[in-house]
């Protein structure tokens, strides 16, 4: 019994008083919890595309795989998809965006970049969270291509039935 009591006293001396512990807990709870991406990189995914996006204050230059946005994505609709988070957050022209994207097709890549960009903007300015959330830019689109099954032509396409 005395060993347990002395152990409790030692732990109490190490940790401090209950009042100190409560004050420290209140300080920790008051601090905002922010999950930062590794080296400021934020990940966006869509289908089989994965994009890593880094945002820095700047002039609005968008670089994807070391190419300009217009050079990487030729279609205007893909430019809109990539820039959508900037337009919704009303921060167009305030940040330089650097993205590395791989896998999937061009539309999946554009949507992956858009999601990574939205996540990084939200981290830089938490007041944008509601706008980005209502625009659907923070929701991961989990639809994937169904795998081909053995004995079928495609995922569900079977051979044509023959009566004779």
Image (cartoon, rainbow, N blue to C red):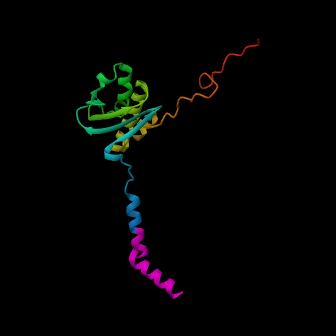
Q: Residue 66: x percent and y percent? A: 27, 30
Q: Nearer the viewer, residue 97 or 99?
A: 99
Q: Residue 2: x percent and y percent? A: 51, 88
Q: Quadrant of residue 157?
A: top right
Tell me if residue 2 is in the magenta stretch.
Answer: yes
Q: Is residue 119 above or below residue 110?
A: below
Identify the residue at horizontal 37%, vertical 41% (top origin): 42
Q: Residue 146: x percent and y percent? A: 56, 29
Residue at far top of view: 164
Residue at far left of view: 59
Q: Residue 155: x percent and y percent? A: 60, 26
Identify the residue at horizontal 33%, vertical 19% (top origin): 74
Identify the residue at horizontal 50%, vertical 86% (top origin): 3
The quadrant of the picture occupied by the N terminus is bottom right
Identify the residue at horizontal 38%, vertical 23% (top origin): 78
Q: Is residue 44 above or below residue 74?
A: below
Range of residues picked out in magenta: 1-22
Tell me if residue 15 is in the magenta stretch.
Answer: yes
Q: Nearer the viewer, residue 105 or 32?
A: 105
């Amino acid at each position: 019994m005395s060993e347990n009591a002395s152990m409790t006293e030692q732990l109490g001396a190490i940790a401090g008083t209950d009042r100190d512990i409560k004050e420290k807990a209140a300080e920790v709870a008051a601090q905002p919890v922010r999950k930062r991406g590794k080296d400021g990189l934020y990940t966006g995914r869509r289908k089989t595309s994965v994009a890593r996006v880094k945002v820095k204050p700047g002039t609005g230059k968008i670089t994807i795989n070391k190419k300009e946005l217009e050079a990487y994505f030729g279609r205007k609709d893909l430019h809109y998809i990539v820039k959508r988070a900037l337009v919704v957050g009303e921060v167009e022209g305030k940040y330089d965006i650097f993205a590395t994207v791989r896998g999937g097709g061009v539309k999946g890549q554009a949507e992956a970049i858009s999601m990574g960009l939205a996540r990084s903007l939200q981290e830089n300015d938490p007041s944008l969270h509601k706008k980005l959330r209502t625009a659907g830019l923070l929701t991961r689109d989990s639809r994937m291509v169904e795998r081909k099954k053995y004995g079928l032509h495609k995922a569900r396409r079977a051979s044509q039935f023959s009566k004779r």
